């Protein structure tokens, strides 16, 4: 009897019981699950941060490029049916103006820019740019010959606004027959992640 009890004591001291082993496995499983969940949260946070960084970079590049084009805008005229009209015109969907390309002053050459919405069958809208070399007031605007590029893709909102420098009022229609250029241009954009801060450009050379 005493020998049997001694053997049981030695066996219990030598290793884990089945219950203890199951408890240890359950705790280990829970810890591993928590660790992997933590890695998952970290991974999702990193992806979210990267999306925010990419979006901020997209905003900055767009703002800087359009800002340079508006800052170097040239106040020129175009002859239409014998009448000279402003080379700047715009509506809610887009605008047309003349500026150097590349950004090296007149050394880069002047070009006519036209910003227009490019609509897809699935409902997506891109901000498209069309560019023609500027050849003077008598040039023919054959946009079929223009170079085309997408400045921004997959937009939800694309609205252009123009400020009258005399009244300070904003409008979404600026006719080329208007003798004065707008004082400022504002672009409202939104993508799949929401609205952008408004992009406002002062037309300093057009005053």
Image (cartoon, rainbow, N blue to C red):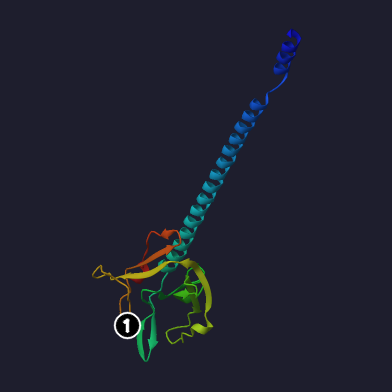
Looking at the image, which is closer to me, 9 or 189? 9
49 over 166 or under it: above or below: above
At 44% from the left edge and 68% from the top edge, which residue is drawn? 69
41 vs 28, left or right, is left
Q: Residue furthest left?
A: 167
Q: Position of residue 179 (x, y in %)?
A: 30, 79
Quadrant (top left, top right, bottom left, bottom right) of the N terminus = top right
At 37% from the left edge and 70% from the top edge, which residue is drawn? 160
At 53% from the left edge and 48% from the top edge, which residue is drawn? 44
Looking at the image, which is closer to me, 187 or 20? 20
At 43% from the left edge and 87% from the top edge, which residue is drawn? 138
Q: What crowding class fits label 1: few (fewer than 14 Cα within 10 Å), some (14-19), or many (20 or more)?
A: some
111 over 203 or under it: above or below: below
Q: Position of residue 103 (x, y in %)?
A: 49, 67
Q: Residue furthest bottom?
A: 81
Q: Which residue is under mark 1?
A: 177
Looking at the image, which is closer to me, 37 or 73? 37
Q: Residue furthest front?
A: 1
Q: Position of residue 83 (x, y in %)?
A: 34, 89
Counting every numbered tag in the picture gives: 1
Could you say whether the residue bearing mark 1 is in a helix, strand or loop? loop
Q: Position of residue 139 (x, y in %)?
A: 46, 86
Quadrant (top left, top right, bottom left, bottom right) of the C terminus = bottom left
77 over 26 or under it: above or below: below
């Amino acid at each position: 009897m005493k020998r049997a009890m001694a053997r049981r004591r030695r066996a219990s001291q030598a290793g884990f019981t089945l219950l203890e082993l199951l408890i240890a496995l359950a705790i280990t499983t829970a810890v591993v699950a928590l660790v992997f969940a933590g890695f998952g949260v970290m991974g999702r946070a990193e992806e979210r941060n990267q999306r925010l960084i990419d979006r901020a970079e997209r905003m900055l590049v767009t703002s800087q490029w359009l800002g340079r084009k508006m800052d170097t805008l040239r106040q020129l005229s175009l002859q239409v049916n014998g009448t000279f009209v402003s080379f700047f015109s715009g509506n809610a969907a887009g605008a047309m103006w003349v500026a150097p390309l590349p950004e090296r002053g007149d050394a880069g050459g002047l070009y006519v820019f036209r910003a227009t919405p490019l609509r897809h069958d699935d409902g997506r809208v891109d901000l498209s740019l069309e560019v023609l070399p500027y050849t003077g007031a008598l040039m023919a605007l054959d946009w079929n010959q223009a170079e085309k590029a997408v400045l921004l893709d997959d937009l939800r909102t694309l609205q252009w606004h123009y400020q009258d420098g005399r009244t300070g009022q904003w409008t979404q229609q600026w006719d080329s027959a208007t003798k004065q250029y707008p004082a400022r241009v504002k672009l409202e954009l939104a993508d799949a992640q929401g609205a952008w801060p408004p992009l406002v450009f002062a037309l300093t050379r057009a005053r």
